[in-house]
């Protein structure tokens, strides 16, 4: 937060601020980032969001645990013999991270014997999508929500049948987030090679995206940022960011910042060839809902 305050309070219209304190805090909190090895931007994003949630929840609980933060009815219910900590409300704390990034998935499994449908909700901050050559975000999302048959060794234990049964399962988006983060799974483990390989597949990500939900309603989104992985493999490389600000696209490459045309974003879709000359590929996409915060 101090870093954003430092940026917003700057009188200079241009320039850069080295994130030394931020990097120091990250290394202190997580030993994975203390060395000089190439780290994954998606893993870092997950760490950052979850760390922010933990910090915000601790701060909220600390405020609620003070007598001044409790309402008169809560103070009475605590009674003189109960510590104030017992007066903390049990409902989950909703931080700005949840309000902006959290969505809900519904995991449905239908028994093919008795037709009973079992549904389980799952929270998510981002969607990790498998990718294919010459595909698009729309087709990747359709595959993510497609129906899968569970049979043979993968049969589903049905509580109603009290036995293993063939079943069909699929994932649905129940509640879309305000900020939709899409992670393209460009790093795949190849058994024949015994290592991970970067997939340079061409995956088209549109400026405007429609997301189908459980209610069969479409949520409309607009692309405003892209994290690009530069490099031919998973263990080395570099990251740059493309961000749309005030209707202009900017490229952030360490302390080098330049304005780019919107058409330039298309050059980061990937390659239709197996051995591409260009190694700059879109890796994490950030879409904002046009319908306002949910």
Image (cartoon, grey):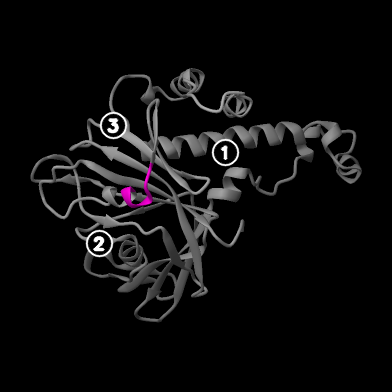
Q: Position of residue 152 (x, y in %)?
A: 22, 68
Residue placed at 37% from the left, 66% from the top?
A: 145
Q: Residue furthest bottom?
A: 114
Of badges 2 and 1, the one in the foreground is 2
Above or below, 249 against 7 in this view is: below
Q: Main secondary structure of the magenta part?
A: helix
Per the rendered image, the range of residues in magenta is 260-264
Of badges 1 and 3, the one in the foreground is 3
Q: CA distance from mark 3 to mark 2?
A: 24 Å
Q: Answer with mark 3 or mark 2, whichever residue precedes in sequence.
A: 2
Mark 2, residue position: 135
Mark 1, residue position: 53
Q: Residues within 10 Å of mark 1 (few under 14, many from 20)?
A: some
Q: Is residue 1 visible?
A: yes
Relative to 93, 127 lies left or right: left
Q: Position of residue 180 (x, y in %)?
A: 47, 53
Q: Answer with mark 1 or mark 3, whichever residue precedes in sequence.
A: 1
* Circle on res. 238: 3
Of residues 202 and 191, the one nearer the viewer is: 202
Residue placed at 45% from the left, 22% from the top?
A: 23
Q: CA distance from mark 1 to mark 3?
A: 27 Å
Q: CA distance from mark 2 to mark 1?
A: 34 Å
Relative to 279, 30 lies left or right: right
């Amino acid at each position: 937060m101090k870093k954003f305050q430092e940026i917003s309070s700057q009188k200079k219209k241009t320039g850069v601020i080295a994130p030394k304190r931020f990097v120091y805090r990250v290394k202190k909190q997580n030993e994975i980032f203390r060395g000089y090895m190439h780290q994954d931007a998606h893993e870092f994003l997950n760490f950052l969001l979850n760390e922010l949630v933990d910090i915000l929840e601790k701060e909220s609980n600390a405020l609620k645990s003070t007598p001044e933060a409790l309402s008169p009815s809560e103070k009475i219910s605590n009674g003189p013999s109960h510590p104030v900590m017992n007066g903390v409300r049990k409902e989950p704390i909703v931080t700005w991270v949840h309000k902006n990034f959290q969505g809900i998935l519904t995991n449905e499994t239908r028994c093919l014997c008795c037709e009973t449908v079992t549904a389980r909700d799952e929270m998510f901050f981002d969607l990790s999508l498998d990718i294919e050559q010459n595909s698009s975000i729309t087709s990747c999302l359709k595959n993510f929500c497609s129906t899968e048959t569970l049979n043979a060794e993968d049969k589903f234990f049905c509580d109603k049948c009290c036995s293993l049964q063939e079943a069909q399962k699929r994932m649905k988006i129940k509640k879309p987030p305000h900020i939709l983060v899409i992670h393209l799974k460009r790093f795949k483990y190849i058994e024949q090679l015994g290592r991970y390989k970067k997939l340079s597949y061409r995956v088209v990500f549109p400026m405007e995206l429609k997301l189908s939900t459980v209610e069969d309603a479409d949520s409309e989104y607009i692309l405003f940022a892209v994290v690009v992985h530069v490099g031919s493999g998973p263990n080395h490389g570099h990251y740059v960011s493309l961000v749309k600000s005030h209707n202009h696209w900017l490229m952030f490459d360490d302390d080098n910042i330049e304005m780019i045309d919107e058409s330039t974003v298309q050059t980061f879709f990937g390659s239709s060839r197996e051995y591409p000359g260009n190694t700059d590929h879109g890796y994490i996409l950030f879409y904002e809902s046009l319908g306002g915060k949910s």
